[in-house]
Image: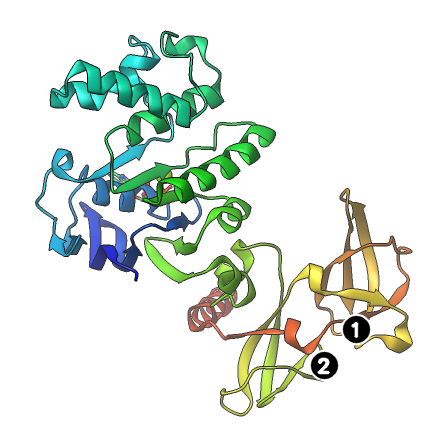
Amino acid sequence: MTQTIIEFKNVTKSYQETQVLTGVDLTIEAGKFYTLLGPSGSGKTTILRLIAGFSNATSGDIIFDGKRINDVPANKRRVNTVFQNYALFPNMNVFENVAFGMTLKGVNKVQIKEKVTSMLEMVQLAGYADRSIDELSGGQQQRVAIARALANDPEVLLLDEPLSALDYKLRKDMQYELRELQQRLGITFIFVTHDQEEALAMSDWIFVMNEGKILQNGSPVDIYDEPINHFVANFIGESNIIDGVMREDYKVMFAGKEFENVDAGMRPNERVEVVLRPEDLDLTTPENGKLIVTIDAQSFRGDYYEISAHDDDNNEWRIQATNPSVLNSRQGLTFDPEDIHIMRFDESEDDYDARLDNYEE
Ligand code: ADP
Ligand code: MG
């Protein structure tokens, strides 16, 4: 049984003239790991602030546990936030930081001690209670911030790019730990990142945002495999995006040739964009290729070679290959029908092209 804990219904947010959220609808179910993913300035923090009650929606409804909470003050919401810069109190030690919310509420000392001890154990900082904040590494400060937020028993934990200040190795470890913590606690996490790899690795469900709108939401696999438009395809991993035409069901034309694919339900000859992921492409001999490409450049990436090539129709291709290729050689390119992902042509980009044409005249 899944239970909806948070809902946004047509929520907008404006500052003076500028609209920073437009018609946001979202549904958050209890006990799952959600990620808001989008570039800087897309409105991710704004959504967290609306959930936490640090900011008011300009219009629309924000529902928590079935009740409209637009007018409920922040301290009455069962939500806590882990901020991007941790926002720990530098003049308090670790214990006092974690105890902060409970101390404010007047919880008795014995209970506070018990809770802080168990929270510090949970984030693997047992024995650090008396340390001052500036004696901690970035990763340890991050854990204190998480312990402090969880000590208030929130129903929902909001995490605003909590890993962005950490170095690569620690970041990977913390991704795993946060995911594990969420599963152990069984509460809802809403995590914000601009890093698609992080989003794919951690989430049950991703909301992809751009310019104050949610463009797509779904499981990591859905979003990776079936991006809804050009922006999402590009943002979620590297893609080859090529103009094409759906001739009829299961027949798509691109790069000057017709291919069998697995999509149906478009108008005959509908204009589409075709997405092929670099890791789904293979190089072979020209006779065995579905397309012929010329190798333009390659670089070694540790576990694969990243190759750029172009076909005879002048489309650029990114290919991840296990073996190196000879520069300027002609090779066959192969892919499976199910690796051809079809997107409806993005009208807004058509407008953009039209505007560009006008401009260029
Ligand atoms: P993100 O977290 O995705 O980087 P934000 O939600 O912080 O994005 O910001 C979304 C947009 O809202 C940005 O263009 C930002 O400049 C604008 N914005 C945020 N806060 C304010 C504010 N207090 N006044 C005016 N504009 C703001
Ligand atoms: Mg932000």
Residue at which label 1 appears: 312
Front-lying residue, 298 or 195: 195
Res 334 quadrant in image: bottom right
Residue 64: % across, % down: 18, 51
Name the quadrant where ligand 2 sits. Answer: top left
In this view, 239 is above or below 41: below
Residue 168: % across, % down: 59, 31
C-alpha distance separating marks 2 and 1 = 9 Å
Residue 10: % across, % down: 21, 61
* 2 and 1 marks in contact (CB < 8 Å): yes
Q: Amino acid at mark 2?
A: Gly
Q: Residue at x 34, y 25 (%)?
A: 119
In this view, 39 is above or below 114: below
| Total residue callouts | 2
Residue at which label 2 appears: 256
Q: Amino acid at mark 1?
A: Asp
